[in-house]
Every structure is written in C-alpha cells, then in structure tokens.
Amino acid sequence: MPRLNSTRLVRLVVVLIGLSAIGLIFKQSKNTLPHIEDLLQSTIQPKHGKNIFFVETNCSWHEHSKAFRLLNLTVRQACAVESAALHNPSFQVFVLFACSTYREAALPAPIKATLGYKNVQLRQLQLLEYVKDTPVEQWFQSGAIYNSSYIIIHMSDFLRLVTLYRYGGLYVDTDVVVLRSLEHVPPNFAALESDAFVANGVLSLAQTGIGHSIAESCLRDFQQNFNGSAWAQQGPLLVTRVMHRICNTTDLKSLVNNRADCQSFRVFDSKAFYAVNGDLWRNFFEPSELEPTLELTKSSYMVHLWNNSSKALYVSVGSKSPYDVYAKKHCPKVYATAGKYF
Ligand SMILES: *[C@@H]1O[C@H](CO)[C@@H](O)[C@H](O)[C@H]1NC(C)=O
Ligand SMILES: *[C@@H]1O[C@H](CO)[C@@H](O)[C@H](O)[C@H]1NC(C)=O
Ligand SMILES: *[C@@H]1O[C@H](CO)[C@@H](O)[C@H](O)[C@H]1NC(C)=O
Ligand SMILES: *[C@@H]1O[C@H](CO)[C@@H](O)[C@H](O)[C@H]1NC(C)=O
Ligand SMILES: *[C@@H]1O[C@H](CO)[C@@H](O)[C@H](O)[C@H]1NC(C)=O
Ligand SMILES: *[C@@H]1O[C@H](CO)[C@@H](O)[C@H](O)[C@H]1NC(C)=O
Ligand SMILES: *[C@@H]1O[C@H](CO)[C@@H](O)[C@H](O)[C@H]1NC(C)=O
C-alpha cells in the first residue's frame, strides 16, 4: 500500500504542478490581447458626441504566417491613436476593427502602448448587425461593396459614415498625428484638401440635427453613386458632392470658417488638417524640411501623412524629419516601441 500512496502522491504533485501552470498561463494572459468586445455589446458606448473614431479595415492574408492578419496596429496607426488620446483626454477614442478573422496573439507592442491610455477602447464590429437600422442596411446585405477593387479603402469610407450616423463624433484617418486638442471645437466640420475638394480624412458630425442629416445624405449618396473601381468616389468626392448640396454652392472656398452659409457646418481651411498637401508628402520624411514644415503646421490640429503615397517610405527614429519629430512629441509611448524605423 505504501507504493500506491506514493503513486497517488506523485499524481497529486503532477496535478498541482499542472494547476499552477494553468495559473501561470492565466497570469500570462495579462500580456495577451484582451478579448476585443463587439462595439454593440460593449458596456462603454460612444456617447454625447465626445468620441473619436478610428477604423481599421485591412483584413489581408498574411503570407509569412499563412493566416489572416493578427489583430495589430502598425506603429504609425498606433501613433495616430495615441496622439488623439493624449490631446483629448475627455473624449473616448474608439479603434474599430472590422475583420471577422483575427488571430489571437501576444499583445503587440504598438497596441500595448495605446492601451496605456484609459480613454482608448479597442472594439470589433459585426458588420451585418452594425448596419441594421441605417439607410444602407439592405444595400449592404446585397454584398455590392465586396465588388470593390479597393475594398480596404471603400470599407473604411463606408464604416466611418455608418459610425457617425449611429453615434455622432469625430472620425479621423489612421495616417495622422494629432497635434492639439479638438475637445472645444463645436461639432459638424471637415476641411478642404484643395480649393475644390473637401476631404473625408477628418469628419465631425453630431448625432442629431444637421450632423445626423449630413450623415444620412452621405450614406444615401454612398449607395446611389457607389463605384468599386473608383478610388476616391466614395471618399473626398462623396463628401464634396454632399457639401455642394448642403451648402448650396460649388464655391467651397467661400465657405471657409463661415458656418452661417452652410447650415452651421464648418468648412476649415486646409491648414487645419492638411497643411502639407498631398503632392508634398515627401516633406514629412526630409530632415531638411523640418523648420518650414513645423512653421506651416504651427496652428494645425493635426497633420495628415497621405499613407496611400507614403506608406512605403520608412522613418528612421531620431532622424529629425518632421514625422519623426511629431511622433516623438505627440505619441511618445508608441514612439518608444518603434525600434529603429517606423
Ligand atoms: C494591408 O496589410 C498588408 C499586410 O500587412 C499590407 O501589405 C498592405 O499594404 C495593407 N494595405 C493597406 C491598403 O494598408
Ligand atoms: C504588430 O505590428 C508591429 C508594427 O508593425 C510589428 O512590429 C509587430 O511584429 C506586430 N506584432 C505581431 C504580434 O504581429
Ligand atoms: C458585382 O459586379 C458584377 C460585375 O460588374 C455585377 O454583375 C454584379 O451584379 C455585382 N454584384 C453585386 C452584389 O452588386
Ligand atoms: C492607410 O489609411 C487607411 C485609412 O485610414 C487605413 O485603413 C490603412 O490601414 C492605412 N494603411 C497603412 C499602411 O497605414
Ligand atoms: C467607375 O469608375 C471607373 C474608374 O474611374 C470608370 O472608368 C467607370 O466609368 C465608372 N463607372 C461608372 C458606372 O460610372
Ligand atoms: C441656392 O443658390 C441659388 C443661387 O446661388 C439660389 O437661387 C437658391 O435660392 C439657393 N437655394 C437655397 C435652398 O438656398
Ligand atoms: C491610391 O493608390 C491607388 C492604387 O494603389 C491608386 O489607384 C489611387 O489613385 C491612389 N490615390 C491617390 C489619391 O493617390
């Protein structure tokens, strides 16, 4: 019998070791990605218009790991999120992930850095539920959007409008650095990106009143004029079309900072958000352009990096190019995770 007892003892020890290993795994799980809640089911809901929304729609196949993309943000995207959270502490910053196929992973460093801010909320979207009770519910169910040749961009164009229609707030592209607070700018605004176009990279719409009507017009236009082969058709071109109608003019420059002429919607001058225009995106990467670029953006709320063009160019950490300097100052935690390049 003593033999049997010692076997039992060994078993007990094995079980205890097993249990403590499970305990360790649970402890470890603090360092893995927390369960990403569905936005609609979440206890923290966007409210009172004090929301900043980012949308991540890149669900691409990751060739290296033979799987769909990890739930992750690039350093640049995380920098946009951190800078928004840092400068707008009284707003909730929602990062909305639109893919249904994320793999679990250890907590990636850029995401971990943004989670250092209490006002950053990562959420998933269930798209069919998310479009319910919006003007585009049936159209979305038809699957027409998946015919797009630029699905990542077009889905992002679409979801920012659905989000503003549902909740109101401020939508911001992930290729920006926020430089100052927007907490005291009254809602309902966008900015020119050139004399003839209003961009959709920054769009504020209130949940009620004119903001909500504009969101509705945008969604109806999206459905009516959708063209999956045209890159900007549902983006800047859409917002520009809707502004022509709302403000009853095609002379958008005449509307700048003139809420009275546009049903109280404010069209900012391009300096506010797009001071360095799309043709000059390389300036963000040139140390020799630091002083003029800082001067040009000194009263800007944010800088837009035009990632469609600039995503292939690296920034060396410490190079003192404009992007390097903005990131170091306005997204310090993410910047610290970047390593040599971002
Ligand atoms: C989507 O992600 C893939 C893989 O990470 C990347 O190569 C691609 O450039 C991304 N596409 C866009 C439009 O950002
Ligand atoms: C997350 O993204 C960062 C920045 O692109 C990258 O360095 C890191 O390897 C990614 N993490 C995972 C787990 O894929
Ligand atoms: C997708 O595009 C094809 C070809 O243009 C068209 O025949 C089809 O009806 C479209 N599908 C949807 C769901 O709109
Ligand atoms: C570029 O910006 C779009 C829209 O904000 C975003 O969906 C996309 O993932 C970004 N791509 C990169 C490489 O940062
Ligand atoms: C859609 O956009 C493409 C590319 O700009 C254009 O060639 C085509 O004529 C457009 N289709 C419609 C129906 O407008
Ligand atoms: C729109 O503008 C035109 C001429 O610029 C004017 O005749 C018309 O009354 C305006 N409509 C509204 C609804 O303000
Ligand atoms: C963005 O890139 C796509 C192809 O990758 C191109 O068709 C489109 O014209 C570009 N848009 C701008 C504004 O550069």
Image (cartoon, rainbow, N blue to C red):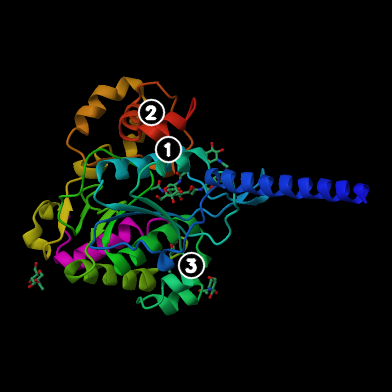
Residue toward you, 264 or 96: 96
Stretch of the chain drawn in magenta: 231-252
The three-letter code of the residue at mark 1 reads Ser
Residue 135 shown left or right of residue 15 in the figure: left
Furthest toward the front, the residue is 1
* Residue 109 screen position, x and y as percent: 50, 38
Q: Does the magenta stretch include residue 244?
A: yes
Residue 15, label in figure: none
Q: Circles 2 and 1: CB distance less than 8 Å?
A: yes
Regarding residue 342, the answer to whether it shows in the image is no
* Residue 122 screen position, x and y as percent: 43, 53
Which residue position holds label 3?
126
- Label 3's element? loop
* Residue 199 screen position, x and y as percent: 28, 52
Task: Give the mark nearer the N terminus: 3 vs 2.
Answer: 3
Task: Give the mark nearer the N terminus: 2 vs 1.
Answer: 2
Task: Give the mark nearer the N terminus: 1 vs 3.
Answer: 3
Residue at the location (46% across, 31% down)?
Answer: 337
Which residue position holds label 1?
310
Which residue position holds label 2?
285
The three-letter code of the residue at mark 3 reads Gln
> Which mark's residue is nearer the viewer, 3 or 2?
3
- Label 2's element? helix
Is 75 above or below relative to 140? above
